[in-house]
Every structure is written in structure tokens, then in C-alpha cells.
Image: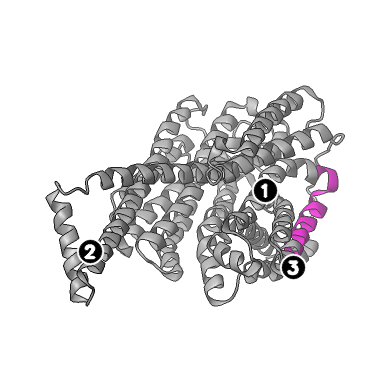
Amino acid sequence: MKRNILLITVIAAAMMELIDTSIVNVALSQMSGNLGATLEDTSWVITSYAIANVIIIPLTSFLAAKLGRRNYYIGSVIAFAFFSFMCGQAGNIWVLVAFRFMQGIGGGALLSVSQAIVFELFPKEKQNIASALFGIGVFIGPTIGPTLGGFITEYYSWPWIFYINVPIGIAVAILCYFLLHEPKIKQTAGRIDWVGIILLAIGIGSLQIVLERGETEDWFETRYIIWLSVTAVLCLSTFIWWELTIKDPIVNLRVLKSKNLSIAAALTFVSGLGLFSSVFLTPVFAQRLLNFTPTQTGLLLLPGACIAIFGLMVSARLLQKGISPLFMITVGMGLFVLFSWQMSRLNLAAGAADITFALIWRGLGLAIVTVPLTALAVSSLAPKDIPQGAALNNMMRQLGGSVGLAVVNTYLANRNALHRSDLVSNITSDNPAAVQRLLSYTKYFLTKGFTSFDAHAKALQLLDLNVGRQSSMLSFADAYLLVGAIFIFALPMLLYAKQKKGQKVQVILSDH
């Protein structure tokens, strides 16, 4: 009974952390108005959290060893809940951004350490079940974030997006105080690698800002984006060299000598790109182009999320029976490609059923991928290296999401401009279809009592509006195809993964 309560508790904590990666997306406009900030400045609320997350996740293994896993985890939960409350109290945009960064620092342990605890609660022969259960939180968290944020924003106010974490955080901290214990064999930590911490923080921080703000700032047309790009390259290159040469690195990159971990990390990056970019694309597409409400959009995502839970459990059972994780990853990524292709085929007349059906393939595909990727990542690691390997793998998922959002945003803007230019070039007096459409619009406004001049002007505005919607529709179709293509091009990496014939892959993840 105690084990089940602890299991639910730490999975809930991980879900809470992941929900907060996307819950604020739909509340930016309300935040902007309430705090008297521009939408551009308000978007730093998302950026600061992402930066903190990606910095802290690879450090969690070291911090857990240095501070004690129980102390570090409970302290992180309390910090997450406290700074969530402070985010809701913020009366200034930059105060909110600062508290949001601290919330992300606290949330780092809620992912990697939660994963270690979940796996430790299961015997070796049931490790894949543990992977599936944790995968539920990993998958559902970012998926329901925008829906939950939309509901709270629509019926309450934006501070409640943060306040909702407080009672959950308090409950998690109390339960872990009584139920969570240190692992039997504690991991030892060497001297603090301050050089590595500083290089990682500056490098990842600079990279995240470039990825999050590049499109808004017109990329390398802006001086600070150029300097941050140079800083990211120099710091991360130096970080890699430093960590590979010192005795007690803050992030043990030597574990990447495992070919399976390297391949799994790369594919986890791709799956994170697909997970977060599809969570961004689909709600925006449904609300902006098909005029769905936040509640309707949330209902679109629900069937796919339910199917994903089923898929996670089935994939764990299949791994348990000796089905190759490489085969399952191939199938899962193939299903995601099918989702991308189906979404690219939709038009402005698409209904809820069309999107829901496609999202089922997305949910099933990502669910089938999640458990085998975790299994593949740690399949060839020594027990002492597994926490570090898991932390790196989790970091790659978050980083893949950030890169995916940056790539998708840039691609959408570029393709939208291209499609709009192509469509406008066809609206000429020599095009009978365009002339007929303009005449029909003009007649419509004439029947509404407008003068001939005003009716013609209104018709041109309506035609321009339709061109804009159609060019947006085409750019979204292109973006879905791009994400699907990335999955296809990533698949050949599986050919280099090693697995003995008939081997049953066990996932063992603990702090010893």
C-alpha cells in the first residue's frame, strides 16, 4: 500500500513539472494585459522556465548524491511549490520571469529523481512496467498543459495556473517525508565541479534564449542573438572538453561511450521534438484556423491521451515478452509519421473527428516509443552509470522540445510568407476564379446596404482574409510534414544499436 501511494505521488510530481512546461502558453495574452507588458516580454515566462529546466536536469544525479536523494527531492518539491505561489503573486513581468526561473530550478528533480524512484519501486523483472507508468506522466503532462491552462484562464485568472501547484506540492512533500527513503547503496559525489556548472549554465542558457527568441528577433539580424550564439558554441564546446578531462565531472559524459545510450538520446531528442511541437501546432491550428474554443481543443486531445496510456502498458508487456525495442521504436515512429501525414492533408473544412482520429495515431506512436527508448538508453550501462544516463536522456527530451518549437515557429513564418506570396500572385484580373470570387463578395456586401465603393473595399478585405487563412493552413500542413520527415530521417540510427538476439531488455534505474 505504501509503495503504491509513493508511486502515485512521485508520478504526480513529475506530471506537475511537465504540465508547467506548456500550461502558460494559452495565458500569455491575459498576463500581458494584467502586468502591462508587451506580448514579447511576457513570452520570457516560458523561456526562463525552459532555460532553468535544461540547466538543472543533467545536474540532478550529482545533486542527489551530494545532498542526499531524499533531502534534494523534498527540497526541490518545496521550492517548486513556493516559487509557484510567488509567480502568482508577481505584480511585474520581470519579477514573474525571475520567479518562473526559480520554479524551473526546483522542478528539475521532479523529473529525473522521480523516474529513479519509480524504477526502484519495482523488481528487475517488472522494470518495463515501471517505465510505462512513468511514461504516462511524461506523455500526458505536456499534452494536457495547454488544455488545463486554457480552462483556468477562461474561468478563473492566470495566477491560478501557478497556485494550483501549491496544494499538490505540499501533499507530495508531506507524503515523501514519511514514505521516501535513501537508496540502500548511496551514490558518492566527488568535489563540486564549479567550472562545469558555470560552463553548462551559461552555454545551455544562451542556447535556450537563442532558440526561444531567435524567430521573434529575426535571428542573426539582432546583435544579442549573434553574441549569445557564439557564447553557446564556445561554452558548450569547452564544457564537453572539460567534463571529459577532469576526474569528478558534474555531468559524466563518458557514459555516452555507450552506443545504445547515444542513439537513444538522439532519438529521445527527436521524440521530444515531436511531442512538444505537435502539442504546440495542433491547439494553435484548431483555435486559430478552425475557431475551436479551448475546451473543444482539450476534448480533441483527450482520446489520444487515453489511447497513449493503453499503448504504454501494452508496450511494456511486449518488452517483457522479449519483443525487440528496436522494432517497437520503428513502429511507434512510423505511427507518428502517419499522424503528421494525416494532419498535413486537412483543410479549413476539417472537423473535430478528423483531428481526433489523427491524434490517436500520435498518442499511440509516442506511447509505443517511450518505453523502448528508456530501455534502450540504459540497456548497456553499468548500474552506477544509470542515473547519469537517465538524466542525460531526460535533458535531451526537453532540449528536443525547445529546438522543435524554435524550428516549427521559424518554418511556419517562412512558409506562410511564401504561400501568401504565391496565392496573391494568382489574384489578377486575368484569373477568372479570382475575379468571380471578388464579384460574389462585392454582391454580398451590396445586399447588406453598403455603397458600391464600400462593398468593393469590404470584398477586398474579405479576400485578403481568406488568402491569409489559406496560406496559414498550407504552412501548418508543411510544418506537420517537416516534423514527420525528421522522424523518418532519424530512424536509420536504429541500425547501429546493439541488441543480442532474443535478449529481453530490462530497465533498471536507481541511484546505486
Mark 1 or 3, which is nearer the eye? 1
CA neighbours of label 1 inside 10 A, class few (<14), some (14 to 19), many (20+): many
Residue matched to label 2: 456
Mark 2 or 3, which is nearer the eye? 2
The residue under the point 54% across, 34% down is 266
- Residue extending farthest to the left is 432
Helix, strand or loop for disc 1: helix
CA neighbours of label 3 inside 10 A, class few (<14), some (14 to 19), many (20+): some
In-image side of 396 versus 179 (left or right): left
N-terminal of the pair, mark 1 or mark 3, is 1
Task: Give the alpha-carbon distance from disc 1 to disc 3, as whole Å.
Answer: 21 Å
N-terminal of the pair, mark 2 or mark 1, is 1
Residue matched to label 1: 53
Which stretch appears magenta?
65-82
- Residue extending farthest to the right is 191
Q: Point out the image quarter for the N terminus.
A: bottom right
Please say if the residues under marks 1 and 3 sit with CB atoms less than 8 Å apart.
no
Label 3 amino acid?
Answer: Ile
> Horizontal and vertical percent for residue 291?
37, 66
Label 2 amino acid?
Answer: His
